[in-house]
Image (cartoon, rainbow, N blue to C red):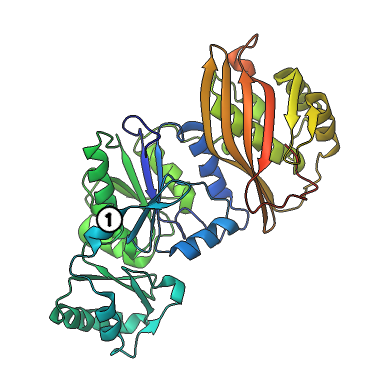
Amino acid sequence: MDRLTGSARLMIVSDLDHTMVDHHDPENLSILRFNALWEAKYRHDSLLVFSTGRSPTLYKQLRKEKPMLTPDITIMSVGTEITYGNAMVPDDGWVDFLNHKWDKKIVTEETSKFPELTLQSETEQRPHKASFYVKKEKAQEIMTNLSESLVKQGLDVKIIYSGGMDLDILPQGAGKGQALAYLHKKLKAEGKLPQNTLACGDSGNDAELFTIPDVHGVMVKNAQEELLQWHAENAKDNPKIIHADERCAAGIIQAIGHFKLGPNTSPRDLPDLLDAKLDHFDPAYEVVKFYLFLERWRRAEVETPEHYLNNLKAVFSPAGLYVNPFGIEQSFDDVIGKLKDCYGDKKGKQYRVWVDQVFPVQIDSNTWLVKFKKLDQTGEEQQCCYTTAILSSKDVEPSQGLAWVHVHQTWMDGSTSDAKDWFL
């Protein structure tokens, strides 16, 4: 949150599984559309918050499997853990708050008296969360009886049932909604309360998100029965909460447009990137557009290759230099030559490219330094490198786009340094 000097234009708080991430979309097009929109139009002045029931272990596993952006804030374990930034620094104030009338040892003892409860994996048992599986027909009875027994032990807890099988026991002050309320309070105290907040969810443990004052909400098209029922009973007349016509991240994009929270046309929705002309210089948009072009080029989805090559020759500075992640320097002429050779080399494959954390800084009247992560994925193999690019507006018009002067890449931790087909 410290990277913004003032209020975020928009804060999106989104659940992950079946909301931001569509597990029924093998091409991941929904989330990739959102990624391109966020990095091109929102990253520089807005906040992205992931709010998930997953533990840190399962959250990190999902990041390796799906083309996910890096959030500014991560709320995990059904709102019992809040962390900040790339390093996922925990919020100690939130930990202290949750300790009130909570004792994990007593919770463990009392739940052991209910044979209908099946303990979830060890990774899902967290300091302020106990997680179980229970059959749907038994859930309500178990929740009532368990709540009574824990109250008798002096605890103040919240029991959440979601997904038709997951039962989570948390401190009363915990939960996705309470975590969001805590963030709002913290940001307000710093004079940084977001101008707008959009909460996004699909299941019962997301319902609390929609109860926070002044928050817009979207239930994605594939929202589960438990959330739709909650909405019908509690918020059917609330115009700030909508049930989207689109699944998952596409529903989030729809909500941005519905509530008029900002641009909602993803660069991925443009059939011809050369038609995407601007009336002002926008380095973040240029970066997103270029790497979307690179994906389409290698997938052989560019209908006029020679036209695009001529355009690249115009926007790549003749004296420009590319330093690849292996430390090898190449001229931009060599880069364009290699680009010609790799046209269609990923055709028919599950190949995708996206950029993450695009941060432009203007360093003089016509030059921008842009730092970002460039990632690509073929099948299940994901590669990532840290990229620094210098873009210039000298001697070009906004409709032509910025000129690329220099690109330098280094491998991120965990990426394979012998990736032979890596390109730009």
Image vertical order of residue 191 relative to residue 351, above or below = above
381 up-or-down from 301: above or below: below
Q: Quadrant of residue 406?
A: top right
Is any part of residue 84 visible from this angle?
yes
Number of marks in picture: 1
Residue indicated by mark 1: 94
Q: Position of residue 212 (x, y in %)?
A: 23, 50
Picture coordinates of residue 349, whole percent (x, y): 74, 53
* Disc 1 residue crowd, few under 14, some 14–19, many 20+, Cα 10 Å: some
The residue lying toward the viewer, choosing from 366 and 287, is: 366
Question: Which quadrant of the figure contains the N terminus?
Answer: top left
Residue 280 in view (yes/no): no
Viewer-nearest residue: 396 or 101: 101
Kind of residue sitting beneath label 1: Trp
> Which residue is found at the position 69% from the left and 41% from the top?
295
Up-down relation of residue 128 to residue 121 (above or below): above
390 in relation to 414, above or below: above
Q: Which part of the image, by quadrant, shows the C terminus?
A: top right
